[in-house]
Image (spheres, rainbow, N blue to C red):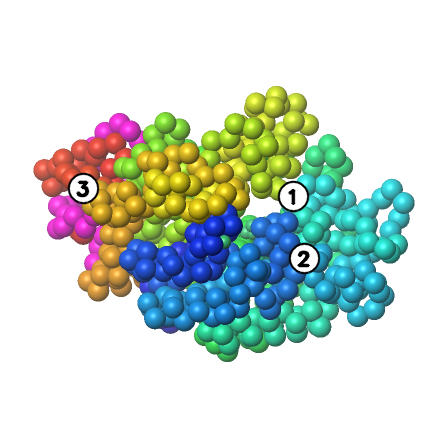
Amino acid sequence: MTKKWWHDKVVYQIYPKSFYDSNGDGIGDIPGIIDKLDYIKDLGVDVIWLSPCYKSPLADQGYDISDYYSIDPRFGTMEDMERLIAEAKKRGICVLMDLVVNHCSDEHEWFRKACEEPDGKYGNFFYLRDKKEGKAPTNWRSCFGGSAWDDLPGTDKQYLHLFHKKQPDLNWENPEVREEVYKNINWWLDKGLGGFRIDAIMNIKKALPMHDYAPDREDGMCSIGAMLKEAQGVGEFLTEMRDRTFRKYDAFAVGEVFDANPDAIDALIGEDGYFSSMFDFNEAFFGASEKGWYDATLITPDDYKRCCFESQARVGDIGFLSNIIENHDEPRGASHYIPEGDCCAESKKMLGALNFMLRGLPFIFQGQEIGMENLPLTSIDEVDDISALDEYKVALNAGLTPEEALKAVSRFSRDNGRTPMQWSDGVNAGFTTGTPWLKVNPNYTSINAAAQVDDPDSVLSFYKELITLRKDPAYKETIVYGALKPAWEDRHNLMAYYREKEKTLLVIGNYQKQEQEITLPSPYKKVLLNNYHDIATDNETIRLHGYQVLILEM
Ligand code: GLC
Ligand code: CA
């Protein structure tokens, strides 16, 4: 495998709206990120990924862009963005932005022009179809509920939106659209970005001609999954994009790829892949149901282990996965992957270490490093997430009581990851002096960065140790490039694996509150990391404490 500059990095995802508000309007902003760069530097990460801060009506919190060349005034100015890139660089940190080009906003000038003149140049920037009374062009359900088609205002046509109706899909079949996209990517790379995280990118290729698929719910519609599976040729677009943009700059590009076909791994992230890396969503999507969130199966520790190992085996040393336990679309990892009632500093550290030591690129989502948890909801009125609001309706329609529906939504709501970063136990968790745009998690009085920064036993300090270990010259080669071999694979509530290259490391997590004993095949040389102060062992048999995690050099 050819070594790349980004292989040994650790990435920190920032959700700008909720990170730090510098001017008291209740909305996090770019100057706020600059204010917190030293915190990020101190954590030890070397790359930050910003969720979108381009000009946007924020119908989907910035994933609906109305101008790819400007920063939304709520987040700051272009000068702020340039200053952020420069200040980050001074600290050895490179910046990734979010590339959202499957769709734009219905407030983008292209869409406005398409409405004015549907048969003109900009009509062909979108997927337009003639309107037929009472029948949408296809029975596709948008990812946020309802038909994927809406009327093109002022015309007799309809337009396609795989996501919200304020997110019209761009027609990638049109070379002019692709040129616009590449021009924009290069414009940003010229500003000194390290690369991009690429949103919903596998959706850019539609199966044509468009047609109906078998309905999968009572509404007579189907999710877009079947259509995407049928779509052929996305690779041509992705190759062209890579060659015209990222490759010229040796930029890093991580794709939001769901449902990757095992045969496609090499094409996606191999030596000559479309992307540098792609996220592993195997754990996140475990238990998902076609019916909706209310019908999801909750993940157990054994499922979690199986999902991680499956992904690792599938990718092997073909390329680099990007490993996450949470992001701005997912529940907090601590609340989701740790059995109910067991969420505590030890279990959070265990989960962090098990994920962090997998082969691939570790991503940390803001607040994960201090162990932030899901937001307890008391009413649906507290929900902002458009996806959660739709899922609430779906649950009610399926016959759940409002309480049950709220519970289902609380588990998966994207707001869980979007509540303001908990900086301190001060007003609004130190996030803003104004009124926060989204409710602060009431647990901020006990879970916050200020309380953890000088505490050697905190979750935050543990994450710093994990990052330091990944960078340690003695272990780096093994942690970054070493093969992963599962150990005691069938043992209930135990997740363990070897990482092998120059060194042999053994990562062991006791994924339960009860103690459990293991016998090592040979005595270990050294304990590299431990979330407890002691290790109960005679060097071959270890009696693991509840949720104890160990990284051993063998
Ligand atoms: C991606 C984003 C998500 C957004 C969607 C549509 O999945 O991560 O937040 O809603 O794409 O852009
Ligand atoms: Ca602000």
Identify the residue under disc 3: 520
Asked if residue 532 lies left or right of residue 61, the reply is: left
Query: Magenta segment: does it hold 416?
Result: no
Q: Is residue 227 visible?
A: no
Instruction: Classify mark 1 as within 8 Å of ligand 1 or not, answering yes or no.
Output: yes
Q: Nearer the viewer, residue 262 or 295?
A: 295
Asked if residue 133 lies left or right of residue 193, the reply is: right
Asked if residue 438 lies left or right of residue 372, the reply is: right
- In this rendering, is residue 548 above or below 124? above
Q: Do tag 3 and tag 2 residues touch (Cβ < 8 Å)?
A: no
* Cα gap from disc 1 to disc 3, whole angstroms: 49 Å
Where is residue 341? Give x, y as percent. 36, 27
Asked if residue 209 lies left or right of residue 67, the reply is: right
Identify the residue under disc 2: 105
Where is residue 80? Give x, y as percent. 48, 66
Which structural element holds mark 2? loop
**Closer to the eye: label 1 or 2:** 2
Which structural element holds mark 1? loop
Q: Is residue 168 visible?
A: yes
Q: Nearer the viewer, residue 466 or 272?
A: 466
Among the two numbered marks 1 and 3 on one chain, the one whose residue lies closer to the N terminus: 1
- Look at the image and give the residue range highlighted in magenta: 502-529
Residue 386: quarter of image: top right
